[in-house]
Amino acid sequence: MLSATLRAMRIDLHTHSHVSDGTEHPAELIAAAHAAGLDVVALTDHDQTSGWEEAGAAALELGIGLIPGMEISTKTDAGISVHLLSYLHDPTHPGLLEEIELARDARITRARRMVELLAEDYPVSWELVAKHSAPGATIGRPHIADALVTAGVVTSRTEAFAQVLTARSRYYVGHYAMDPVKAVKLVRAAGGVPVFAHPMASARGRVVGEETFTAMIQAGLLGLEIDHRDNSYEGRKFLRALAEKHDLIITGSSDYHGTGKPNGLGENTTTTGMLERVLAAGTGSEAIGMPRL
Ligand code: AMP
Ligand code: FE
Ligand code: FE
Ligand code: ZN
């Protein structure tokens, strides 16, 4: 008897494990993605790829496709934070490695300084922050938020970000990150597929203007993450028009962080056609355990 499966593939291309600021081991994240009914998931920890191996083994075991990825911290001359997703790049590319290592180190110095400032008013310490991060994890404000929760200062990461950790807070300190145009070029040089993460997340802070999009596209940007809960409604319309004009890949993703954020796996998804474009453009590493698309 013939049984045709007409269910569309469920593809989520933006998630975090405790290699950065997610709350689960990479293998746990893959199990959660499988349980959520996803067919393909990308692991995109901030500024590092050390979760790829564990995630790949879990993906093969469970029968789910894994796109190895990363979310790179960058900053414009005007000081605007730009997150750049990279898929299928070569994780050993020296130029890219050097820059993400600089960003990770700068994040530690910056977090230590923020904790010093916070410790003037709240019962937090670097030791407490360290307890809330996995060894070697890319340190971010979410780890400081977890320490503030344990110290009883706030009840959740969300509350911490709404109060003491916002970029407008007196405890906020910035950190070095390369320019987004340089990041796009490095990702391409490493055989990766650069996709601008949540480009119109205006509630998080300032967003870049059209000139930055143009510069990034000229440098080799290949995609825009449009369906993401933090992009504004008006912003998505602008992004769709831009994608159309420049024939860019468009993605939709959850930006799942385990229990660290309300974002649920598969809450936004990417089409099979767009995933095929990502796979065709990425030459620096292999997707793992991919189902037939
Ligand atoms: P940082 O990279 O240290 O500047 O911190 C930014 C990170 O914090 C982002 O990667 C987000 O995942 C996370 N984040 C931002 N806003 C929130 C929020 N309201 N609740 C939980 N996590 C957040
Ligand atoms: Fe994050
Ligand atoms: Fe991001
Ligand atoms: Zn993210």
Image (cartoon, grey):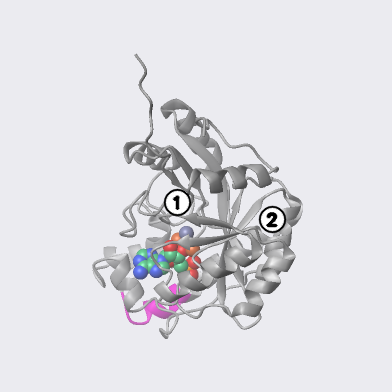
In the picture provided, is 198 more to the left or to the right than 5? right
Q: Position of residue 28 (x, y in %)?
A: 38, 39
Mark 1 Cβ and ligand 4 under 8 Å apart: yes
Which residue carries the number 1 mark? 15
Amino acid type at image mark 1: Thr
The CA span between labels 1 and 2 is 19 Å
Residue projecting furthest to the front: 2
Choose the circle earlier in sequence order: 1 or 2: 1
Amino acid type at image mark 2: Val
Question: Magenta stretch: residue 115 in it?
Answer: yes
Q: Does residue 140 appear anywhere in the picture?
A: no
In the picture provided, is 221 more to the left or to the right than 31? right
Instruction: Please provide the residue range marked out in magenta.
Output: 114-122
Q: Quadrant of residue 174?
A: bottom right
Q: Which mark is residue 187?
A: 2
Q: Secondary structure at mark 1?
A: loop
Q: Which is more toward the observer, 259 or 220?
A: 220
Q: Position of residue 38 (x, y in %)?
A: 39, 40
Ligand 2: quadrant of the figure: bottom left
Q: Does residue 193 appear anywhere in the picture?
A: yes
Residue drawn where x is 38% and y is 41% of the image: 33
Q: Which is more toward the observer, 97 or 139?
A: 97
Magenta stretch: helix, strand or loop mostly:
helix
Residue drawn where x is 41% and y is 53% of the image: 22
- Dot 1: few (<14), some (14–19), or many (≥20) neighbours within 10 Å? many
Is residue 149 depicted above or below 43 in this figure?
below
